[in-house]
Amino acid sequence: MAEIGTDIFKASKWLETAVIGMPTETVYGLAGNALDSLRVADIFRIKQRPYFDPLIVHVHAIEALTPLITEFPEPLKQLAAHFWPGPLTLLLPRSKALPDLVCAGLDRAAFRIPAHPMALELLRACKFPLAAPSANPFGYISPTSAKHVSAQLGDAIPYILDGGTCRVGLESTIVGMEGSSLVVYRLGGLDLTEIEDCVGKCEVRSNESSNPRAPGMLQSHYAPAKKLIVGNLDELLANNSNKPAILIVFGKYRQNYPKSLQLNLSTGANLSEAASNLFAFLRLADEAPQELILAEFVPAEGLGLAINDRLRRASYTH
Ligand code: TXA
Ligand code: MG
C-alpha cells in the first residue's frame, strides 16, 4: 500500500525507480520520469490506459522545455507567459528527446507547468521532466485528494505526495495550433474567456468523440460506476420517483427533497467553488447507498463550460 506523505526528497528518490502520486492544482497526477520509456510504460499499465492516449509532460520552468521541443509558436508562447504556472497544457512540436510512448508517436507533445508549490519543488528536485496523467484508472473520475489516489491506485505505487485538496479541481485546459489557428482540445481549469482575452478567438474542439485526438474527448469519461443522469432536476425527480437518488445541485437545494441526499456544488453559486467540488462529490455520490445520481447543469459560462462538459461525459452511457 502506498505511503502518503509530504517528503519531497523521498518522492524524488522514488521517482528514480518508480511511479508515484503527485499533487497539482488541477487534479492529482500519476507521475514518472518522462525520459524513461520503462517508467512511462508503468504509467500506462497502472492506469490501464490505452497506448494511443498520450500523456502530459510537466516541467518546472519554460527553459526546461528547450531540449524537449523544436518550436514554440508565438501565440502559445504568449499563453505560457501569461498562464504558467497554471491549469493550461500546450501542445508543442516535440524533439526526439521524449520517448514515442509519451506522446503516442504524435509529432506534438503536451506540456504544462503546474501551479502547486509542492509539484514545482518536486520537479526542481528531479533531474527529469515528469509525465503525469490524472491518477485514476482510465475512464474513472479524476482524483482531487491523496486519499482518492490511494483508494484506487494505492496498491500499485509506493508513495503519494500529499499536497492537500486540489484548488482548481478540473484538469487543465489543452490548447494547440493547427496552421495559424488556435484550437482548444479540452475545456478545463483555465477559463476559455481568459485564453481568448490573451490571444484572440479559439476554435473549441473538445466535443469530438470519434477517433479522439485527446481522450478527454471521449464521450464517456470521468464516469462514476453507478448511473448518473444530468438535466432538469425537477423533471428528473418526477421521472425517477420510484428510485432512491442522490442529487448534485448548484446554488439552491431542492425544497421537496431531503437535504441529506443533496450535494451542493456551491451554495453561493460560485463556479470556481463548484469546479473544485465536482469530482469529490461525484465520488461521494458513487459511494452512497442510493442507486442513482441525478445532477443539474451549471450556467454555461466561464468554468461552467468545463464543468458541464465533465458532467455530460460522466453521464454518457454506451
Ligand atoms: O490537469 C491536468 O492536465 C492533469 C494534471 C495531472 O496535470 N493531467 C491530466 O492528464 O489530466 P490526462 O492524461 O488525464 O489527460 C491528458 C490529456 C489527454 O486527453 C490526452 O489525450 C491529451 O492530454 N494529450 C496529451 N498529449 C497529447 C498530444 N500529443 N496530442 C493531443 N492530445 C494530447
Ligand atoms: Mg485523465
Image (cartoon, grey):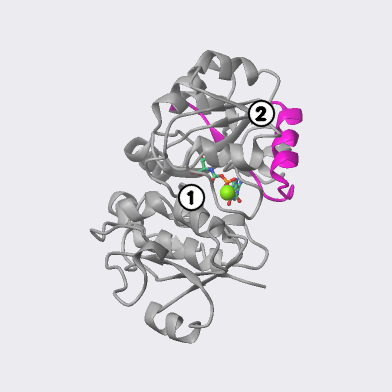
Badge nearest the viewer, 1 or 2 = 2
Look at label 2 and name its amino acid.
Answer: Val
Q: Is residue 24 left or right of residue 271?
A: right
Q: Is residue 73 above or below residue 255?
A: above
Q: SS class of the residue under badge 2?
A: loop
Figure quadrant of the C terminus: bottom right
The magenta-colored residue range is 34-61
Write the residue at 71% across / 34% down. Answer: 156
Write the residue at 34% across / 51% down. Answer: 195
Q: SS class of the residue under badge 1?
A: strand
Residue 37 lies within the magenta run: yes
Judging by the rendered image, the residue that carries numbered circle 2 is 19
User: In the current view of this chain or complex, which residue is farthest to the left?
Assistant: 268
Label 1 near ligand 1 (CB < 8 Å): yes
Residue 86 lies within the magenta run: no
Please state the horizontal and vertical placement of residue 117, each as a whole percent of the image. 39, 26
Q: Is residue 150 left or right of residue 230?
A: right
Q: Quadrant of residue 17?
A: top right
Specify whether residue 49 is in view.
Answer: yes
Look at label 1 and name its amino acid.
Answer: Ile
Write the residue at 73% across / 50% down. Answer: 50
Q: Sequence order check: which comes first, mark 1 or mark 2? A: 2
Write the residue at 50% across / 17% down. Answer: 7
Looking at the picture, tell me which residue is in the foreground, 44 or 136.
136
Please state the horizontal and vertical placement of residue 148, each as a whole percent of the image. 54, 42
Judging by the rendered image, the residue that carries numbered circle 1 is 174
